[in-house]
């Protein structure tokens, strides 16, 4: 895609785009075969990995507020709260391994976002915004996620 036809987005919009893409991919891949609560956990772990790079120097509460804010754009707040508190049941090796994989994919994609020149903390709007502070959005080119949940 050439520079003159590229769609320009803020870092916040870009993260939202990748999160929505990951959500659609999860729904297509697992559908009714994986309970919604587990899909929410997978999405939360993906987003955590995606935003960990951006929030590497922030307090954990700031990063958590950003994760919560993004998730609440897609799923109801009760499900967000449950996903952020949930842990895999003892012996659920599939979920444990999958959580690790999707978080690693998110982190890899977060590095890709920053490598393209997005180097400021993301602004986001929610009731948690005061915890994260404010910053000017960076502008990055949109590249669709190429390998989310490909394994």
Image: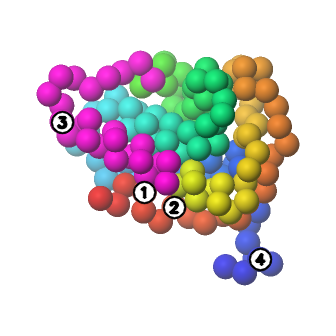
- Which tag is nearer the camera, tag 4 or tag 3? 3
Name the residue that disc number 2 marks.
145
Residue on which disc 1 sits: 148
Asked whether residue 75 is drawn in magenta, I would say no
Whether label 1 touches label 2, CB < 8 Å: yes
Q: Choose mark 3 or mark 1, whichever is in front.
A: 3
Judging by the rendered image, the residue that carries numbered circle 4 is 3
**Which residue position holds label 3?**
93
Question: Which structural element holds mark 1?
Answer: loop
Left or right of 141 on screen, residue 143 = left
Q: Earlier in the sequence, mark 1 or mark 4?
A: 4
Q: Nearer the viewer, residue 96 or 31?
A: 96
Residue 54 horizontal side relative to residue 136, left or right: left
Does residue 102 appear left or right of residue 80 in this picture? Answer: left
- Assign a secondary structure to mark 3: helix
> Residue 52, percent across and down?
56, 39
Label pair 4/3, CB-CB below 8 angstroms: no
> What span is in magenta?
84-108
Q: Residue at x 74, y 31 (%)?
A: 125
């Amino acid at each position: 895609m050439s520079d003159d036809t590229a769609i320009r987005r803020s870092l916040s919009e870009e993260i939202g785009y990748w999160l929505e893409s990951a959500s659609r991919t999860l729904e297509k891949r697992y559908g009714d075969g994986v309970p919604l609560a587990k899909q929410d956990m997978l999405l939360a772990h993906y987003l955590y990995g995606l935003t960990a790079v951006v929030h590497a120097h922030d307090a954990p509460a700031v990063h958590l507020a950003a994760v919560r804010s993004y998730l609440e754009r897609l799923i109801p707040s009760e499900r967000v709260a449950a996903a952020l508190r949930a842990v895999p049941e003892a012996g659920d090796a599939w979920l444990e391994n999958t959580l690790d994989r999707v978080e690693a994919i998110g982190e890899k994609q977060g590095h890709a976002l920053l490598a393209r020149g997005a180097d400021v903390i993301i602004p986001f709007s929610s009731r948690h915004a005061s915890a994260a502070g404010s910053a000017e959005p960076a502008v990055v080119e949109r590249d669709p996620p190429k390998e989310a949940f490909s394994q």
